[in-house]
Image (cartoon, rainbow, N blue to C red):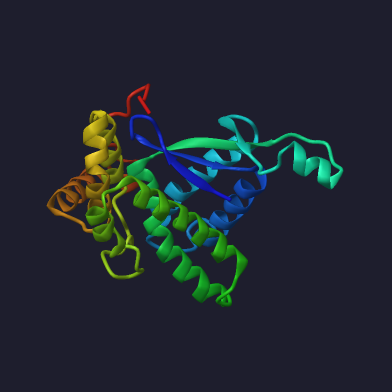
Amino acid sequence: MIQLKNTPNYAGVYVTGDWHDFNELYDALHFVVGEEWEYAGFEQVRLRVLGVCYDLRHAMMGGRGARFVSNGLDRDKMRFLSIAGTESNIYLQFEVLWPELLFVSFSLNEFIDKTTQTKKLHAWDPTIAAVRKFQSAVAACLEETLPESKFKNCKRYFKPRLYDSFYRYTTQYLDELNIQFIEMDRDKRLANISIMVKRINEKNNRYYKLKEDVEASAKHHGVSTDMIKIKDEYPEKIHW
């Protein structure tokens, strides 16, 4: 089962699961975001979801982290079952920034809607269920992390199509949120997780100003908007 746990300094979370958990989520995410350019206006959002797939794949290849997790068996149980084994399983894990995780999680609602409609999937489709399990893990981590009042405010964003769409989303804004979040100290990060939920779901004046600047710069240079980078850069090292 996919589990999420805060990193020590609240920069993000550890995404943890066994190889089969990661493989199931990897395939499910790839399926719901569709092929390249399949969903017009969502290509840049799609790439952020595929960024999580990239980490999943490298974790499965042994390129990220791992930890031991109790499997519930002890010597007495193994003796009763007449088996020999260990009391722990190896779980794979990787880190993801809080703003990035939230963006991907909320954007998946629209990909699920589109995939369900275009592929004519039934309500119990296992692929959609795998994506929902991941979203549920994100929600569980939020609930464990935030005060009750803040989590209550966050829950209203879980419902699909209630707030702003991710259609033609200017993802440079997400880079800006990520970098701002990284630059905060531990306590400020914790206090701003719920604010990031709102920033991602409700486009404010800063978002629209950045969108305008990105589009103007792209037009000036004769390139697509995805080629425009913000001035601030990600640090080489993150104090997770």
Expressed as whole percent of the image width and height from the top left, the position of residue 207 reads 19, 50
Residue 240 occupies quadrant: top left
The residue at the point 40 percent across, 33 percent down is 7
Above or below 198: residue 96: above
Above or below 63: residue 158: below
Residue 43 occupies quadrant: bottom left
The residue at the point 37 percent across, 22 percent down is 236
Camera-nearest residue between 118 and 226: 118
The residue at the point 57 percent across, 52 percent down is 25
Expressed as whole percent of the image width and height from the top left, the position of residue 55 reads 53, 39
Q: Is residue 150 visible?
A: yes
Count of marks placed on residues = 0
Above or below 161: residue 225: above
Camera-nearest residue between 62 and 47: 62
Expressed as whole percent of the image width and height from the top left, the position of residue 61 reads 65, 34
Expressed as whole percent of the image width and height from the top left, the position of residue 168 reads 32, 58
Is 68 left, or right, of 32 in this rendering? right
Camera-nearest residue between 38 and 60: 60
Is 112 left, or right, of 176 in this rendering? right
The residue at the point 27 percent across, 39 percent down is 190
Q: Residue furthest right?
A: 82
Is 71 left, or right, of 41 in this rendering? right
Q: Is residue 222 visible?
A: no
Is 8 left, or right, of 196 in this rendering? right
